[in-house]
Amino acid sequence: MLIKTRLPLMMILLSLIPLFLLSFLIYRHTSKVLITNSKVNILQTTNAYSSALAAVIDGQRREVNSSKESLGIINVLSNRSRNKDDSFYHSKEVLNLNKSLKENKDNFPEIQHSLVIDLNGNVIASSEENALKFNVIDREYFKDSIKGKTFISNTLISKASNKLIVVVSSPVKDLDDNIIGVYANAIYIDYFQKFILNIKNGDTGYAYIVDKDGNIIAHPDSKKIGKKSENTKLIDILRNIKDSNKVYDGLDVYTYDNKDKLMGYKTIPELKWTFVFTKNIAEVNEPAYGELKIIMSVAAFIFILSVFISIFASRSITKPIGYLINVMNKARKGDLNSLCEYKSNDELGMLTGNYNNMIKKLNNSYEELSAVYEELSATEEELRSQYDELIENKEALEVSECRYKEVLNGINDALWEYDVNTGRFFASDKWYDITGYQTEHYNILKLIEKAVFPKCKKKLYDDIKKHINLKTPWFETEVKINAGDGKIKWILNKGKVIKDDDGRILKYSGIISDVTVKKKAELRVKQLAYFDTLTGLPNRTNFIDQLDNEVRNYERDKKMGAVLFVDLDDFKRVNDSLGHDEGDKLLKTIGNEFFHTIDEKNTVCRFGGDEFLILLRDVSGKDEIIDIVNNLIDIFNNGFEFNKKRAFITCSIGICMFPKDGKNNNSILKNADTAMYKAKETGKNRYEFYDGEMSKGLNRYIQIEKILRSSIHNNEIYLCYQPQVELKTGKIIGTEALIRIESKEAGFVSPGEFIPVAEKSGLIIQIGEWVMKTAFKQNKEWIKKGYGEKRISVNVSSIQLKQSNFVESVKKCIEETGISPELVEIEITESVLMESLETNVEILKQLRSFGVRTSLDDFGTGYSSLNYLRIMPIDTLKIDKSFIDDIHFNRKQEAIVDGIVNIAHNLEIEIVVEGVETREQLNILKQKGCNIIQGYIFSKPVTAENIDEIIKKTILF
């Protein structure tokens, strides 16, 4: 390997190893922290909602105990002991009780029916006629209640409705404290189903409830209700708990539907029920994957920078060597007048000077020989007169010859000459060093037959013939030989034919050079340029060259081909669990399986990382492609074994047919990649053919990003304001600024559509600063108009918070607009705050120290951890609209709002309720002591011009 190649490679390796070691350590630490936070959140969610479930059940128990005292049930049961006839069922007091039970049941939509049961198990009164005279003496809830217990049953099928119910029952006692019967409420199992349907976390988090035997009581998939849970890990936990009255909770990992999941669980001892919250581990780990991308991007940038620096340093060192080699090549061709012009005081400068001196002496010797030759051409008398002088010059000639030999021995080439007439072959000493053969032991023609490889031999003779026929000025051929020492070498043979005046060949003369190192380097460069070093498969460059050729031919010949884009699903998990060495082995094994699965006419390529490309040539249609793809997916069915460890992995495949779905390399690869990501989105371990519809989402993203980039300049972006009203006084105390876009090109664009694009593209920073300046300036204008000092709330995203100068940017906007900091409120969502809790808490503290108010938006929809409220430096807590929509008839929602309001008031945090639309909602929130209301009941978000009239009003209600 040449110095100019070896030197930069060594420099690059010296920087690469510590760089990637440091990147790995940083990633390992940050991913551990992020994943731990996600697990804590799951456990807290489980504890919060299991407590809420216990509270709901306790409410049902209290309802049964209070109703049995207030509905006249004791009198009816007391009279039953004296009247056993059927006429009792038609008595006035029983009919009145039936009516009271029905009215009471109508007040509680979760109750299917209410029952009054005598000591013989006969239903003597009910909210439903078809339940009368049923006998429930065999029911567990009746047996336990007769013993004096308030009982909550497991799920059972109602005799009255034939539907799944849970029964809450309590004994009824007379004035002497004797048990005279049982009062029971049958609760729809759907009541618990609605409870768990509102519990979500991220994209894959959901909850369900099981009884002590593992039977599912409530589940987002209603088909599973009443069936045994398929979570074997949970069944083992329930088996260990048995009938214990202790509270068990914790986290555990299990696999369901080929997905690894993390579950939090907590038991409710008095019910023998267990509340379970589960979430895909892939989503739990998702924040760590994002961190990895950032770390690898920075590492790649530093690595590329080191490559450029290494190449520059190498060239500055090896450039003088190149000058010297160039001059030596000229000397080898006979030009002894060319000298190396490089001058320096370093070692290369000294070498150049010595070489120039040697060439000058050799040139002088040639001139002396020329002079002697002219003298020899003189007359006989001149020769005799100069005889003595020739004797004197003999020694000088010998010195010159020695110098000539020294030069020959100093170069790496061997001179040779072959006399056609005598068959004599002469070669310099370097011949043996290069070929390993002594010339005196072989006839040169026989040596060529023995040593030169057949293909090279034919090329050697063809090149000599072309020169003899005057087609080339000399002959020059690279030949492969079996050297005398047993090694295989590459030799460069260059020479000319010497002819007499009649054109007859007298001699062949030339030089040979050992070019083995150069030839190996060329082959290595070719291998590196066109083949993957790990798997030996064609690389991306090789694949694109082949694809380009196929695309041109297929469009011309009306044929059809396809490109398969294969991505290994969750390959990082293999590297993390088995190590990167085993991961490399797995890639080699998969590449080898792909290679042997497809036909020889097709090409398998490693595209990079855990991605492969497969080029299918001349396919008949989709059916043929599907058969090939299914064979590829089948490779992964049984997993792969390494060092007695088995790795299970799947792949997602995107398919682009050409020229139908792509006319050139870029479009074909892009469309295949798009189809592959579609396969991943729809569940992984599958394939998808490219469809033009797949590109529409990408095109929409590009259109919105284009609109965003010009929205401020084109006045397509504007703010709407929604008033915030103090419940106690009915006065407007502030407004929230909400961003809107009305594009000439695309019309109205929803914030839910353009804000994610703005965050991904980084434009949210510029737009966010514009929003703050515009909102603050507008609020200042309202103050100047005499509307009074009112707060202005502005939402910020996680991208803005991550800017190192965010706090300074807020201060700058306040100072430039002249607004008082106390009138500014910065809103962040719960999920944004938790992305980097410690850092974001510090930012909020800095804002508050400047006088700016802080608000936590969408509370209850994200992490929902009341524990974090202790450390969060916030002034306002905003309850999300989803908790308000059905508050007037959903007791659970009402209970949650009660809890949030009480905790916030105890922590001296102001409450703002969003999304209030009806008078019923307003009255309930007023009773609960909520501070501020925001919603359509007062005004929808409107522009600054339209909100003027609303702000002028002193009191809105």
Image (cartoon, grey):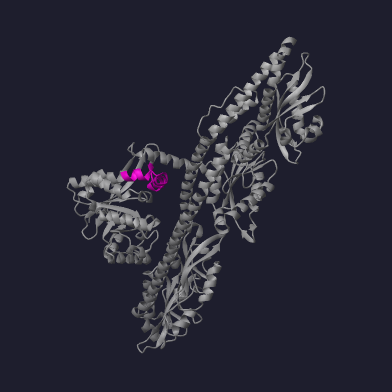
The quadrant holding residue 937 is: bottom left
Give the extent of the magenta segment: 748-769
Position of 837 relative to 535 (above/below): below
- Of 697 and 158, the residue lying toward us: 697
Residue 160 magenta: no
Position of 282 relative to 471 (above/below): below
Magenta highlight: main SS: helix
Q: Quadrant of the N terminus?
A: top right
Q: Position of residue 304 (x, y in %)?
A: 49, 42
Q: Is residue 205 visible?
A: yes
Residue 765 magenta: yes
The quadrant holding residue 492 is: top right
Q: Position of residue 402 (x, y in %)?
A: 68, 28
Q: Residue, x 67% and y 44% (percent of image)?
A: 624
The residue lying furthest to the left in this view is 786
Position of 70 relative to 842 (above/below): below
Q: Position of residue 424 (x, y in %)?
A: 80, 26
Task: Give the side of residue 102 with respect to residue 459, left or right.
Answer: left
